[in-house]
């Protein structure tokens, strides 16, 4: 039996997390889901958006499945995601973006992995106003964190049968910060002579990904570029409802999809559960349950290919739970 921390989150979070648990449970794997919430809804009840009991539960279980949480724009509490990633040193955000057969996309062969440095850069939270009309944000980059994410990207290739790493940066302008990031990843590349290595400036990298995503394999980059590129790549394969992810550290992993709490469709039961279901397949891989992870992926692909029980974002009429039930049926075929 596995003890897994579950954070339903805000907006569509509880809906898609419920759907994902349903599909995982349908495989017969014995999981004890320990639910402890965080986010805007918890703030109202408990006076904190990130309760201590959640941190303790994650520390105990070391694996969590997390729904998205709403973060206020401009003012209000700081991002819980950023807090969790920093607190548990979840330094690598891994986001495989793969085209799914049956979904209309101009990029049917897209299959790349974004590895985003998850603890530094402009997301360090060091920001201050100097006076009413000026504000500063610190872009923090260290050699240690940059080498660590570089090494992670090359090791990821070895473990996942990937052949090439592209380091994405803006070191032509940000000579010191991105310069250090680039130099650190380049240093790591020397230890992996069998893995192809290239470097691209971020704006050009975006253009190249859109023109020919098939030429990319693993892309490693600082936090902000990784955030933006993830949503861009999700759009290329059919939307945010499809792309899974994981926040990985050496000890603790929090699995969560790329998408946010989608307030525009929350509460209507129409969010696409695929991203979180594929996220839980990544979790099963991590737990050593590769067989069940594979069964879930094939079930998701079958339901999408069939095109009946799919949510509105994919052109269907099914609800979140309709789609999850159809996937669970394929799991048990
Ligand atoms: P979002 O990712 O929530 O939504 C962007 C667009 O994609 C919306 O039109 C939404 O309806 C659609 N979408 C997202 N997930 C979908 C799904 N599963 N099925 C169908 N359509 C889906 O981004 P947005 O609107 O910028 O952010 C909303 C809130 O989420 C903000 O408070 C933001 O801070 C938070 N957020 C939280 C994240 C997390 O907890 N990991 C990640 C990203 C955003
Ligand atoms: Mg994002």
Image (tube, rainbow, N blue to C red):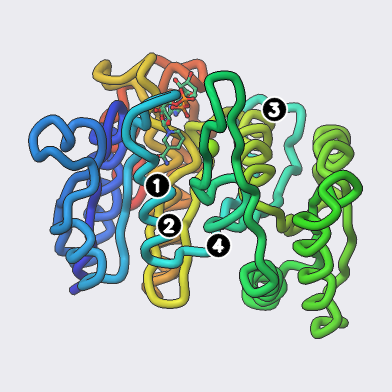
How far is mark 1 from mark 3, CA to CA?
30 Å
Circle 1 or circle 3, nearest the eye? 1
Identify the residue shown where x is 44% and y is 36%: 303
Q: Please, is residue 261 above or below residue 175 in the view?
A: above
Q: Is residue 248 left or right of residue 213?
A: left
| Label 3 or label 4, whichever comes before in sequence order | 4
**What is the secondary structure assignment of the residue under circle 4?**
strand
How far is mark 4 from mark 2, CA to CA?
9 Å
Circle 4 or circle 1, nearest the eye? 1
Residue 286: % across, % down? 43, 70
Q: Are marks 2 and 1 in contact (CB under 8 Å)?
A: yes
How far is mark 2 from mark 3, CA to CA?
32 Å
Q: Which residue is mark 1?
A: 81
Q: Which mark is residue 85?
A: 2
Q: Which residue is mark 4?
A: 92
How far is mark 3 from mark 4, CA to CA?
28 Å
Q: Please, is residue 189 above or below residue 57 in the view?
A: below
How far is mark 4 from mark 1, CA to CA?
13 Å
Residue 189: % across, % down? 82, 76
**What is the secondary structure assignment of the residue under circle 3?**
loop
| Label 4 or label 2, whichever comes before in sequence order | 2
Circle 2 or circle 3, nearest the eye? 2
How many discs appear?
Answer: 4
Circle 3 or circle 4, nearest the eye? 4
Q: Is residue 296 left or right of residue 307?
A: left
Q: Which mark is residue 105?
A: 3
Identify the residue shown where x is 46% and y is 76%: 250
Q: Is residue 97 left or right of residue 66?
A: right
Callout 1: CB less than 8 Å from ligand 1: yes
| Residue 93 seen in render | no
| Residue 64 seen in render | yes
């Amino acid at each position: 039996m596995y003890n897994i921390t579950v954070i339903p989150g805000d907006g569509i979070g509880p809906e898609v997390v419920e759907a994902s648990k349903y599909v995982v449970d349908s495989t017969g794997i014995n999981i004890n889901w320990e639910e402890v919430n965080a986010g805007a809804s918890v703030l109202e009840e408990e006076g904190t958006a990130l309760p201590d009991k959640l941190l303790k539960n994650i520390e105990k279980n070391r694996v969590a499945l997390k729904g998205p949480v709403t973060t206020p724009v401009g003012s209000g509490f700081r991002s819980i995601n950023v807090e969790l990633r920093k607190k548990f040193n979840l330094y690598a955000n891994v986001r495989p973006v793969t085209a799914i057969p049956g979904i209309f996309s101009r990029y049917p062969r897209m299959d790349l992995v974004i590895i985003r440095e998850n603890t530094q850069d402009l997301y360090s939270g060091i920001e201050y106003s100097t006076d009413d009309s000026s504000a500063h944000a610190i872009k923090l980059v260290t050699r240690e964190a940059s080498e660590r994410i570089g090494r992670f990207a090359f090791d990821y290739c070895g473990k996942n049968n990937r052949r090439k790493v592209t380091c994405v940066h803006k070191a032509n302008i940000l000579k010191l910060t991105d310069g250090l990031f680039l130099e650190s990843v380049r240093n790591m590349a020397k230890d992996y002579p069998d893995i192809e290595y290239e470097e691209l400036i971020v704006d050009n990298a975006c253009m190249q990904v859109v023109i020919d995503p098939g030429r990319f394999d693993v892309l490693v980059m600082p936090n902000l570029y990784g955030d933006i590129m993830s949503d861009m790549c999700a759009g290329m394969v059919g939307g945010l409802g499809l792309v899974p992810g994981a926040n990985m550290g050496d000890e603790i992993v929090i699995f969560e999809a790329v998408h946010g709490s989608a307030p525009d469709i929350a509460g209507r039961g129409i969010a696409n559960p695929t991203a979180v279901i594929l996220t839980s397949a990544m979790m099963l891989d991590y737990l050593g349950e590769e067989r069940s992870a594979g069964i879930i992926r094939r079930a998701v692909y079958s339901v999408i290919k069939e095109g009946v029980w799919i949510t509105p974002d994919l052109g269907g009429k099914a609800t979140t739970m309709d789609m999850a039930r159809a996937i669970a049926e394929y799991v048990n075929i």
